[in-house]
Amino acid sequence: MKRVRIFTTKTCSWCKVAKAYLVDNDIEFTEVDIIEDIAGRREMVLMTGQHGVPVIQVGEKAIIGWQPEEFEALRKA
């Protein structure tokens, strides 16, 4: 199973939607709050070149924004 990480903020509504999907589908993930975790924020910006959340990392690839179909395709690849 590929590692899943989600870069979020507490006020991001799409982050909440994405996390709910992961929880509802029993998908283990690690959350990185980019407001509280400066190193995590830096990592996300270096990986994607932008500051928007959510960013969902599946293995070595990242999705910018919440796109369930793209997420599932990455998970199954």
Image (tube, rainbow, N blue to C red):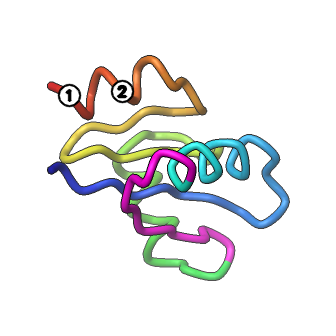
Residue 35 is left or right of residue 60, and the answer is right
- Residue 28 among those drawn in magenta: yes
- The residue wearing badge 1 is 76
Q: Amino acid type of disc 1?
A: Lys
- Disc 2, SS: helix
Residue 50: % across, % down: 54, 41
Residue ID at (78%, 66%): 10
Q: Which residues are magenta?
A: 24-35
- The residue wearing badge 2 is 72
Q: Amino acid type of disc 2?
A: Glu
Q: Residue 56 falls in which quadrant of the image? A: top left
Quick one: 74 or 48, which is closer to the camera? 74
Residue ID at (39%, 58%): 5
In this view, 61 is above or below 45: above
The answer to whether the residues at label 1 and label 2 have Cβ atoms under 8 Å apart is yes
Q: Residue 63 falls in which quadrant of the image? A: top left
In this view, 71 is above or below 38: above
Residue 24: % across, % down: 56, 49
At label 1, counting other C-alpha atoms closer than 10 Å, the crowd grade (few under 14, some 14-19, many 20 or more) is few
- Residue 57 among those drawn in magenta: no
Residue 41: % across, % down: 52, 65
Residue 3: % across, % down: 24, 56
Quick one: 45 or 73, which is closer to the camera? 73
Residue 73 is left or right of residue 18, and the answer is left
In this view, 39 is above or below 34: below
